[in-house]
Image (cartoon, grey):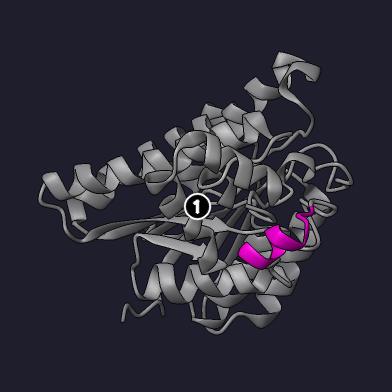
């Protein structure tokens, strides 16, 4: 079991949702935590709360658009100065727009790829070389349940989260190939959380039976900290039953898999979507 006390952590999108819930757990573990987030109001509130509850660690907060390569580079240097080093990077920030692909301006799709995928290239490239040099470090990428089972109405978001899963998997294999067993990668695949980023996302009774909704953000945060960081698992899937999608994809003909997907209500999952507007700071309020 990996000990987290004294670890230096960056959490993107850490001012609300899953990001904030994860930060709460990390400061209670005695970590130094740096938050990057785009919302100034929520960022300042999170810094105040986390500083008051820190168990020996320090909290740093910076405004950051993670899709801005230059800003990520600037804040990576600030994190090294503030904390001395970076042991853990949790890529959680994200952006979503719902609706059928052909009904959306293509700029919405491109922005989702910029925030949900390209931003990970920037942050990982900043910190992975020094982790490899030390042969120590952990990168956690928040993917999604829709990377396992696609959700109509979330085409670009689904695409981006498949990419995050693939990126995490191949980087894990690359560092193993390089003989750097001390550098770990984890992909996190949350299911539907009832509030926050994906409020209003809903499956029918069959879908809820196969993938029960998650009651709050801390359920996912607990999985990130306890399973991903402490137990160093390659994948954290919550609820576990989402893994059934992988089994079905491998065993069933495509036309049957598509029928089951639609029978579970995924075809109308965003019909009553509310969510947050604009930037989404916790990629995985639903996954």
Residue toward you, 260 or 117:
260
Quarter where residue 63 is shown = top right
Whether the magenta-drawn stretch holds residue 218 is answered as no
- Please, is residue 15 above or below residue 65 in the view? below
Residue 21 is left or right of residue 69, and the answer is right
**Which residue is found at the position 27% from the left and 48% from the top?**
172
Numbered-mark total: 1
Residue 284 is left or right of residue 4, and the answer is right
- Please, is residue 4 above or below residue 14 in the view? below
Quarter where residue 112 is shown = top right
Quarter where residue 168 is shown = top left
- Please, is residue 272 above or below residue 218 in the view? above
> Residue 287 at x, y = what percent?
62, 52
Residue toward you, 130 or 282:
282
State whether the magenta stretch is mostly helix, strand or loop.
Answer: helix
Residue 218 is left or right of residue 240, and the answer is right
Q: Magenta segment, which residues?
A: 202-210
Whether the magenta-drawn stretch holds residue 205 is answered as yes
Residue marked by disc 1: 245
């Amino acid at each position: 079991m990996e000990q987290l006390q004294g670890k230096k952590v960056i959490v993107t999108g850490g001012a609300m949702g899953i990001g904030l819930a994860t930060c709460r757990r990390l400061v209670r573990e005695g970590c130094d935590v740096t938050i990057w987030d785009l919302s100034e109001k929520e960022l300042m509130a999170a810094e105040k709360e986390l500083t008051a509850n820190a168990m020996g660690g320090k909290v740093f907060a910076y405004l950051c658009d993670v899709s801005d390569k230059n800003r990520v580079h600037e804040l990576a240097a600030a994190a090294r100065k503030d904390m001395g080093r970076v042991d853990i990077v949790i890529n959680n920030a994200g952006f979503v727009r719902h609706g059928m692909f052909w009904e959306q301006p293509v700029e919405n799709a491109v922005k989702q790829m910029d925030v949900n995928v390209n931003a990970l290239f920037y942050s990982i490239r900043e910190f992975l070389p020094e982790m490899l040099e030390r042969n120590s470090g952990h990168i956690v990428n928040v993917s999604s349940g829709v990377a396992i089972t696609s959700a109509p109405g979330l085409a670009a978001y689904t695409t981006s989260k498949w990419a995050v899963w693939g990126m995490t998997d191949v980087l894990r294999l690359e560092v193993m190939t390089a003989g750097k067993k001390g550098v770990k990668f984890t992909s996190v695949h949350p299911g539907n959380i009832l509030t926050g980023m994906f409020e209003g996302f809903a499956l029918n009774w069959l879908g809820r039976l196969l993938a029960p909704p998650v009651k709050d953000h801390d359920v996912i945060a607990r999985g990130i900290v306890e399973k991903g960081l402490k137990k160093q698992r390659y994948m954290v899937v919550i609820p576990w039953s989402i893994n059934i999608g992988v089994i079905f994809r491998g065993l069933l003909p495509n036309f049957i898999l598509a029928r089951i997907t639609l029978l579970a209500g995924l075809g109308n999952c965003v019909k009553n979507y509310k969510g947050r507007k604009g930037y989404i700071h916790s990629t995985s309020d639903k996954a």
